[in-house]
Every structure is written in C-alpha cells, then in structure tokens.
Amino acid sequence: MDTTAKISDISKTTTAANYACRILVCCRTQQMTRGESNENVENGVQDLAVNDSLSAGRGYDLWHVSFKALLLQKSFNFRVQFFSNCSPKKLRMDSNLNCSIEGNKKVCRGALVVLEGLDRSGKSSQCSRLANYLEGQGISAELWRFPDRNTDVGKMISAYLTNTSQLDDHTIHLLFSANRWEKRSLMETKLKSGTTLIVDRYSYSGVAFSSAKGLDIEWCKAPEVGLLAPDLVAYLDIPPEKAAERGGYGGERYEKLEFQKKVAESYKALHDVSWKSVDACQPIEDVEKQLQEIVFDCVTECQKGKKPLSLLWSK
C-alpha cells in the first residue's frame, strides 16, 4: 500500500500528532496484509478493536482509516492521502459516478438495488427471482450477496456465523464491513457499465445487527461511509415471530427470536427516503410482483441518467 502524508504546518502539534497516529496505524495494517495467515490478520484486526480507546468519542477517525487501509490494499490498490488543508476523513474517490464512456458512446449506469430484512424473511429467494426477471426484460443484472463467503475475509465471517470461531463484537463488525469494501471497486465498475446489481444484504444489515448487540449505531456506520449508496432498499417486513416459524430457522448464530426482535428495532432507525417496505407475510408470488414493480421503476430511472450514484452516509 502506498500511503502518503502531507502536513504543511508541523508546528501545529495537535494536528500533526493526530495525522501521525493515522499514518502509523495504516503502516501497521500494511504489514498485516503482506501474505500473512488469516489468523494473523484476524488477530491484528482484533487488536485494533481492543485499542478503540485511542479514538473514543471521535467517531469517523483513526479506526476508520486504519480499517479501510487494511482491506482496500488487496482489493484495488486504494490510495489513502492525508492533507493538512482538508479533513483527513475524506477519501479520494472517482468523481464521475453516473455514466462511463465506451468509445464515443455514453453508457448510462445500472441500478444498485438492496434487499434487507430479518433472517428468513425471504430475501435470498426474492433476490434470485428479481435477477431472473430483469434478465428476462433484457436488462443486464447480477445477483450479489453479503457476506461474500468466498473471499478470505468472507471465510472468517462464515466460520463465525456457523459457530466454529469466536470473535469480539467490534472485530466481526469490521470484518463484515471489510467484506463489502473488498467488492466496492468492482461494484462501481459494474454499475457504470450498465449492469444492475441485486444485492442480498448490505451495510444496513451490518449496522442493524451490530447495534442490536449494544454497539453505538454511529460507530457502526463509520466504516461504511464512502461505500456506494443504494438507489433502492426494499425492506421485506415480517414480524420476528413469523420469521421464526419458517423452515431452517436457528441454524446460524443470529437466528434467535429475542435477538431478531432487537434487529427489527435497529432497522427502523435506518429507514430513509431510499427505502420501500414490502409485506413479506404475503404469498411469495405477491411479494415477487410488488418487488418487480418498484425495482423496474428504479432501474428505468437510473438508465435515463436521472439519478447519479451517491456515497453512503456521506454529508
């Protein structure tokens, strides 16, 4: 990872010390990513979590920078730059987030559609149906799922979810977020080339589940800032008691009724204008039809270039 610092006024000791701490942690995470085992990386991330006292009360700071530096080096040679004349929170992003240019042809982007909801609300089935429906309409579409259990980070998450490993709540939260950052560059490329992405769970799940454990909701949001914001979040609304009656319930760590009730409350705090709720207690076919209508409208709007991509929870 190529991490650089530009500090013009070193006499400002408070600012310089703050920047130095950030750079030090980034260098430390760089060492962790140079071919070391999953166990070493896991221990390193957990060590950063334990030392959260260094950044307590500052929200989106040294935690956030060190965490992203760890993940983004492998996925797309991300470059973190610190400047004295602007906030070190800012990450250098591509400003053209709407369309790509192929030859002389302007290609308008696909839509980023996320399905959220409690465990066993029917997200995975409906995501598959949506992707097939869009392809049938001649729309380029792909189905994505988070966590992506095929990556190195995803395998660590999978072991945790299936109760074969134990991790601190802060650590697993950062790993879930890391799993999304691994795919950020590819996600933007796909969208700008005109492919619509149907995503089974996204940042909202990470924040809802972690805050349901008692973690501060703003702390939970911080590592997600800078990811791409969905054009549409379809929330499959179902009472936790009804979801618990469905087949296969209880097979993974989080599938506990009382915990799912807390998750449902956490989701309510995350609703914004991009959300549309769908009654997931309806017959599967009725849920499918309603989703098709709202997703098709969203895709059409994005294809017309009326809705540029934006960044998640960025002010």
Image: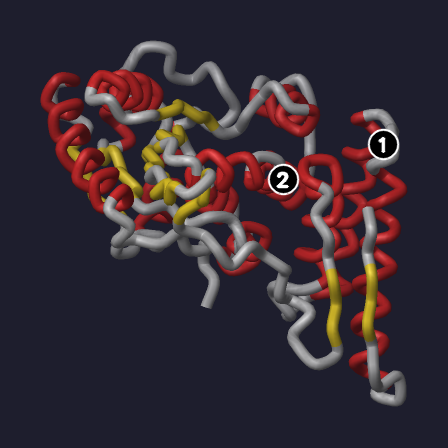
> Quarter-wise, where is residue 41 in the image?
top right
Above or below — where is 79 with respect to 191?
Answer: below
Mark 1 crowd level (few <14, some 14–19, many ≥20, 10 Å Cα): few
Q: Which residue is mark 2?
A: 178
* Residue 4 relative to residue 134: left or right: right
In the rendered image, the vertical position of residue 88 relative to residue 304, given as above or below: below
- Looking at the rendered image, the disc whose residue lies closer to the viewer, 2 or 1, is 2
Residue 258 appearing in the image: no
Side of 211 relative to 76 (left or right): left
Q: Quadrant of residue 114?
A: top left
**Quadrant of the rendered structure where residue 32 is?**
top right
What residue lies at 70% left-to-right and 81% top-to-bottom?
A: 85
Between discs 2 and 1, the one toward the N terminus: 1
- The disc placed on residue 301 is none
| Front in this rendered view, residue 302 or 295 | 302
Residue that label 1 marks: 40
Looking at this rendering, what residue extends furthest in the front direction?
104
Q: Residue at x 41, y 50 (%)?
A: 229
Q: Give the amino acid at mark 2.
A: Ala
Above or below — where is 70 with respect to 226? above
The secondary structure type at the circle numbered 1 is: helix
Location of residue 127 in the rendering, given as x and y in whole percent from the top left corner: 31, 23
Q: For the point 28% across and 45% down, which residue is it?
A: 302
Colouring scheme applied when the structure was drawn: secondary structure
Secondary element under disc 2, as helix, strand or loop, is helix
